[in-house]
Image (cartoon, rainbow, N blue to C red):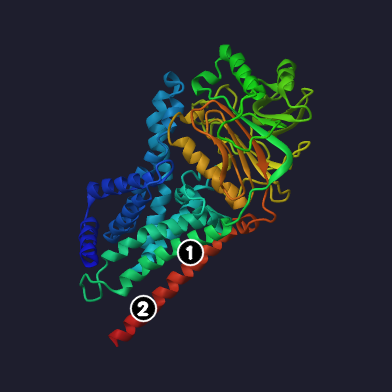
Amino acid sequence: MVLAMMGALHRCAGRLSVLRGWRRQWFAAGLGAFATLALPPVYLLPALLVSFPGLVWLLDGVERSRTAFSLGWWFGLGHFVTGIYWIALALLTDPERYGWMIPFAVVGLSAILAVFPGFAAWGVFQSRVKGPGRVVVLALAWTAAEWLRGHIFSGLPWNLIGTVWTISDTMIQLAALTGVWGLSLLTVMCASSPALLADKSESGEVKIDWLHLAPVLIAAAALEVVWAGGAIRLAGAETPTVPDVSLRLVQPNIIQNHKWLPDLREAHLRKHLSLTSSQVKDPFVASAPAATTYVIWPETAAPFFLDFNTTVRFRIAAVTPPGGLVITGMPRATPPDVYPQQVWNSIAAVDSQGVVSGTYDKFHLVPFGEYVPLRSVLPLNKITSGGIDFSAGPGPRTMRLPGLPPFSPLICYEVIFPGNVIDAKDPPQWILNVTNDGWFGLSSGPYQHFASAQLRAVEEGLPLVRAANTGISAVIDSYGRVVASLGLGSEGIIDSPLPQALSGSTVYGRFGDFILLAMLFLGAVAVWYRGKRDRVLRDRNKG
């Protein structure tokens, strides 16, 4: 039976390796699209066991580096178009103004992002490595390309392939050691390894031998080791809470094309105020506290400039817990008589006296959403409200507010950047992420965004509190486990205590992306050593 399976794989590999022209390109795009099924919220992990071996076999038939890059690019194009299709929904919030941009935004951005898998495939070809080593090289090159994708220009590390493991609290514990990069490396290496079962033996026959089976068994064992390590880490891992801190997360579920309508802003504010003062407890949270001490609203929940609007501040103060705070997303601006005018996407804390006791300005802005790159050249407007580009804040920082442990505030997609979510010089004790995923509609986007937030909690060993306009709002502990949540498209509140941080930093939290560099270096050395040994053995056999 195993031999028959290997024979079938060999025939499949042979057919793929001889594809040429548009057939090879479209097949690569289809494989990339199929791999998207492994991402949240579908989590069809076996799809990777088809897509990545198929990519390896396509590369086996490549004779030029340019063709290798093209194959990787087409694979990436299929993968990203199906992974970030929800960008179209953001533009459809105002279809008359922005609907025409949909093909340019979805396909154009995917075409740019596909350059990185293209370079990964090019790297595999340039290495000239054969046998099991080419699977290792693909994993190393893919992971390095993901890191570059997250850093070049403004960076977009969305849907990193290691995100597929957020289906399992146990598997994602590896991120505390290696960050999501270790999960990506493991995923590509293990998913690609079945391609080796189609390799012929030295005699040219298709037969069962250790050379073919060993890498696959090692890959399976690696997954078992990661699972066992995660299980050991979680065994008996309790979630102690911060005393005297009781959170209420407000999720108003306001659809995006209504959010900034002038005649609805008052109604939106009243909804936030009503949910804040509501006595109804979330029936899904068994440990809801007796009294709320801190309330958290999502991104731009207060659609007013609070610095200049005393009336709105006092209305918020009226529902603020005594001695506590309402922490809300809001726009912030320079005074009207100050030139040039600046606007920030911000977080503000309002106390029970109506005083703003602290603010934070978003530093990682969304291109075309919050500012227009090369504005002097591109005749475009940003798709968010207002004609002025948002200004960027100074970077990750730790906020200190009365009665709360120090925390790292993050707005929207700032949470997707591994290793860049806290101020390492002033470490926080938890992470606050406010977001408005109403832009994504009822799509896979909010689930993908939420999965990134889970991984940041594991990587830093810090609890993460997430307040979203339309969902997914949640309290996540320091191990990435969801303590309480409110689903996509729901209106309501979450009442929950605040989990405590781990007693010490994680390995990844301490060393950051130096861990990735070490993995890439060790992997490259292993491939080089194996290649050198194989050459020596071949020379001996010839002699």
Residue 15 seen anywhere in this rendered image of the structure: yes
**Taking 207 as reference, is 282 above or below it?**
above
Picture layout, residue 348 above or below residue 6:
above
The picture places residue 132, in percent across and down from the top left corner, at 36, 68
Q: Residue 362 falls in which quadrant of the image?
A: top right
Q: Quadrant of the C terminus?
A: bottom left
Question: How many residues crowd around disc 2 within 10 Å: few (fewer than 14), some, or many (20 or more)?
Answer: few
Residue name at image x 57 percent, y 48 percent: 480
Above or below for 146 versus 41: below
Residue tagged by mark 1? 225
**Distance between the Cα atoms at labels 1 and 2?**
31 Å
- Identified at 32% across, 61% down, the residue is 194
Residue 43 spot, x, y in % from top left = 40, 45
Q: Nearer the viewer, residue 388 or 360?
A: 360
Asked if residue 128 shows in the view, the reply is no
**Image quadrant where residue 323 sits:** top right
Earlier in the chain: of badge 1 and badge 2, it is: 1
Q: Secondary structure at mark 2?
A: helix
Q: How many marks?
A: 2
- Residue extending farthest to the bottom is 543
The answer to whether mark 1 and mark 2 are in CB contact below 8 A is: no
Secondary element at image label 1:
helix
Image location (x, y in percent) of residue 336: 71, 19
Residue 136 placement, left or right of 232: left
Image point (37%, 67%), residue name: 217
Type of residue at label 1? Val
The location of residue 534, given as percent across then percent down, is 36, 77
For disc 1, the neighbor class at 10 Å (few under 14, some 14 to 19, many from 20) is few
Q: In the picture, which quadrant includes the N terminus? A: bottom left
Which mark is on residue 535? 2
Q: Amino acid at mark 2?
A: Arg
- Residue 31 is marked as none
